[in-house]
Amino acid sequence: MVHSENMMARNIRAAVLRKKDSPLKIETLSMEGPQDTEVLVRTVASGVCHTDISMVHHWEKADGPLVLGHEGAGIVELIGKKVRAVRPGDHVVLSYQSCGSCRECKNGRPTKCRRFYELNFGFQRPDGSNALEQSGVRGHFFGQSSFSSYILATERNIVKVSKKLPLTILAPLGCGIQTGAGTVMNMLHVRPGESIAIFGTGAVGLSAIMAARIVHANPIIGVDIMPSRLKLARELGATHVIDSRRADVASGINSIIRGGVDYVLEITGNHRMLQLAIEVIKKRGTAAFFTGDGVPDFVPKGRKAVTVIEGDSVPQLFIPKLIKLYQSGKFPFDRLIKFYNFKDINRAMKDSRNGKTIKPVLCMSNEDD
Ligand SMILES: [Zn+2]
Ligand SMILES: [Zn+2]
């Protein structure tokens, strides 16, 4: 492998996954870079997303040791020779990776990037190399691996943000929150007066509810099994809520709006809810599915099922828009956040898994190197 002349190596602290369903261990690793097209970011904070948790659950021995994390935010420390979008000292929020040269990327649709899977789940750079190779660990998850004191990103997955807002709050915008809000605003283009039901009111679902309120959807129906989340759903914009452990969802929705809703967002991944999502949309309605685990086996004619990837969001356009909405008080996503020290990453993941915390954010600056 040929490295550019300015390539350096540094010690970083990163949470390493070495075993299925096991706690991550914070270790010292050696990271080389940045390459000419890369941006080295000192991590200030990282959100924990359900995709990180499911990676721990689906890990196999052949995957080898990995660094997860894909909702990073931090301060640019070094840039490669070809980087123009940011300079050292800039504050940045990181999002998913895309190639920038396929037809979809060139048409401004990076979530449809032909190399999307490989660049976000391949645990390597676009050129196939790996900055953590010296340590026998693989990084570059979503072009980030943000459960780490340093991140190597590229101009494609970096968004420059104002220094006036705390990076600890902005961190989770790069995946879960952008996905929920983007599905309503960029993908489904929900219009005033259209009806929407949201199955699962975690970070993605609550972001969708806030976005639905902004675009004046009505009714906005939140469905979940946790009363505390349903209470928050109401406060953030749901006009109705249904506790699916206590009430029948289909008849509940039918009593709110006869004939079904225009849109359902199915975020739970629960098999019964997948089927139900299709049943409660009206004719020509759309059900949007978030879990890679699949869409229902049967979709009646005239109804539409779509799979969501990052809510069709272009991070450099959508994240600044969400920040403006946050500043104007219309998108109070900070209410979903609970902060943890980096060293408490396993507790943060556990609290997220059992629903105690909606959006854990790890604070790296509290970490003692
Ligand atoms: Zn592409
Ligand atoms: Zn995610």
Image (cartoon, rainbow, N blue to C red):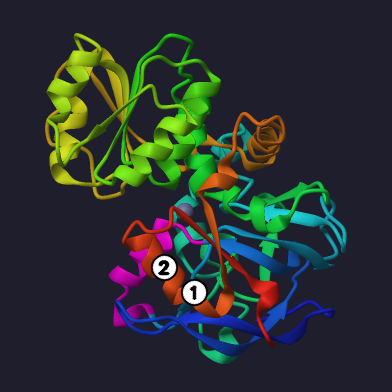
**Number of on-image labels:** 2
Locate the N terminus by quadrant: bottom right
Which residue is rendered at x = 30% and y = 49% of the image? 292
- The vertical placement of 327 against 256, above or below, is below
| Overall secondary structure of the magenta section | helix
Disc 2 packing (10 Å; few <14; some 14–19; many ≥20): many
Question: In which quadrant is the C terminus drawn?
Answer: bottom right
Image coords of residue 261 (percent x, y): 28, 16
| Marking on residue 349 | 2
Left-right relation of 123 to 253: right
Q: Amino acid at mark 2?
A: Met
Q: Residue at x 56, y 72 (%)?
A: 147
**What range is drawn magenta here?**
48-63
Residue 201 in view of the camera: no
Q: Residue flagged by tag 1: what amino acid is it?
A: Ile
The answer to whether the residues at label 1 and label 2 have Cβ atoms under 8 Å apart is yes
Going by the image, does 81 lie left or right of 13? right
Q: Can residue 61 be found in the magenta stretch? A: yes
